[in-house]
Image (cartoon, rainbow, N blue to C red):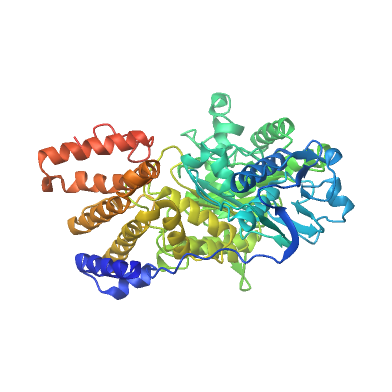
Amino acid sequence: MKAKIRNAAKFLVLALIGIAMVFSVAACEVDVPDTPDGPDLPDETGYSLVEDGISSYQIVIPENAPADISYAAKELNEFLGAATGAYLPVVTDAQASGEALISLGETSVAAELGISVSEEEDLGASGYKIVTSGQTVCILSAPGGSGEGCIYGVYDFLADAVGFKVYAADEIAYEQKATVPLYDYNETADPSFDMRSIGYSILMTDQNYLRRMRLMDHYSDERWAGFGHSQVSDFLPPDIYGEHTDWYSTTQTQLCWSAGDAMETQFAENAIALLENSPEVEYLMFGQGDNQVYCNCSKCQTNLEKYGSYAGLQLVFLNHVVEKVEAWRTEHAPERNIKYVFFAYQGTIAAPVRTENGQIVPYHDDITPNEHLYAYFTPIFADFSQPLENNANESDYTALQNWAAIMPGRILVYSYDINFYNYFVNFNNFNAFKAHLQTYYDYGVDYFYSQGPVWSVVPSFSEMRIFVESQLMWDLSRNYDDLVDEFMQAYFKDAAGAMRDLYDTICMRYAAYAATTGADIGGIYAGIGTSTIWTEPVVSRMADCIERAMAAIEPLRTTDSALYTTLSNRIQRENLDVLYLQLTHYESYFSATEQAQMVEDFYYYANLFGMDANRENGSLEGLFD
């Protein structure tokens, strides 16, 4: 029945937007399969992890366990206990007894069983190994690391044991089970992208939510220093400009990359001081300013002729700096492996290369990147509604290929998940996100960051995006549309069909508009909030989806009032996009009384969810005056 309702809805939307079915289906996967039944489970051992709500198991962690191992133990105990009623004691190696043990990290328990991670098993920062030996289960991550992979091993262990799955901060699924078998494990897990990050304020302010989505945050992760536009702000702050005017561009927002040895030495010394004070840092970022106003002094003009571009100037400068810092590291901290990260961004996104004998090579020998340099590829002007291989993204795709040619395996990606001019309009990257990930994966990228609304809370299916994107970063073989449907069922429950129709309506309207106009609607500064895109019939259709969603949960008002309130709020959060479009473009369709109620509802729910801006550096004050 749901499929029939959804197909009828599609027909109505297509009639409203006035475009043939072929265009919409080609751009948006709309035939939704059933939600997956769950993971393929290993064989049972014959032992029970929990039996009739009772367990004899202990969770074992090393003495002086890293914070991530302790967190993994907490999560295992919390959710296994919540699902079965059996809360397990957490003990150290010395306190462990018997064989009914769940060992996390490099414990003496694992060592005595001969269970370890070999050098050939490259688990990276977030992979894990899980092995069952008799009644004991061992979950390990990369030797000598933080133990991050153990957290994700625990989550997969819980998924098998009790159907554990995190959809959002306030939507965590698990089965209530009195008896849980012990499974026979002997496997490793290697995520598609070793390090994954999504920049949403709702993640950055909730570390549990962040970790449970298997993500990290540049701003709080101790492995990072200097994240962002740090060349001027962190390493040569402009308060010394008066003494060294020749070290900066005239705007003081970029360095003069041709200033010479004295500036490079001071920059390196400041970087060394940071590393000395931060022994945990692995990624040290030297990020250029957030603009394209580069130094135009006579030295830079001369070097532009020699090195071909500002990207070439920056690489020469960074090669000199890294050489100085590495000389210090080799002598004073030889055990550390520092990755020095720079932006390939705005005016430096095109790699400084030339073709020689059919091969892509650095434009000049001085440009050959130091082996410790890593490019943070940041295609800020891409059309994120199209694959990178699409003609719309030709220059960015070429840039990626060229960077990969001169520094293979040393590219990180900084992507985008928001339109900075329209926080109350869905960003149109739904159907190209996985294609972008696949392209980066094919070029050896294992570090992916997608910047969303870092400093503001927004509607526009934020929780769904976080769920789907984090799942794909972990396992690129998953299907985007299947994940959308899984999320809808788990998060919106009785209203899932109507909310899925809202998503489909948005998807298909974008597809139709792009097919008929050829306009860029996937850029982070694209004009996607206009009435030419969001015509009155389409917005009315979106409002109808919200009404049907509310009608679907109405019975819960009396049968489960708490769940009704939760689902109502989730629906009204997405309704903010609809109210915004109605009040911005179609207020004349409503009476003065209706308009006043709509404005009141908008501000009530925006305040309830902590939303305070309609765009980057904007606000909601006087939005509909």
Which quarter of the figure has residue 275?
top right
**Above/below status of 126 relative to 260:** below
Q: In the rendering, at what x and y percent does residue 28 appear?
A: 37, 67
Q: Nearer the viewer, residue 18 or 330?
A: 18
Which quarter of the figure has residue 488?
bottom left
Determine if residue 380 is in view. Answer: no
Give the quadrant of the N terminus: bottom left
Q: Would residue 311 be found to the left or right of residue 291 on screen?
A: right
Q: In the rendering, at what x and y percent does residue 428 appear?
A: 37, 57
Q: In the rendering, at what x and y percent does residue 609 appear?
A: 38, 37
Q: Nearer the viewer, residue 457 or 450?
A: 457
Q: Residue at x 43, y 61 (%)?
A: 485
Q: Would residue 593 be found to the left or right of residue 525 on screen?
A: left
**Above/below status of 504 relative to 125:** below
Give the quadrant of the C terminus: top left
Which quarter of the figure has residue 356?
bottom right
- Residue furthest to the right in view is 112
Q: Would residue 207 be found to the left or right of residue 429 on screen?
A: right
* Badge count: 0
Q: In the rendering, at what x and y percent does residue 398 appear?
A: 51, 64
Q: Nearer the viewer, residue 588 or 338?
A: 588
Q: Residue at x 21, y 53 (%)?
A: 531
Determine if residue 557 is in view. Answer: yes
- Residue furthest to the front in view is 52
**Above/below status of 334 relative to 124:** above
Q: Residue at x 27, y 39 (%)?
A: 602
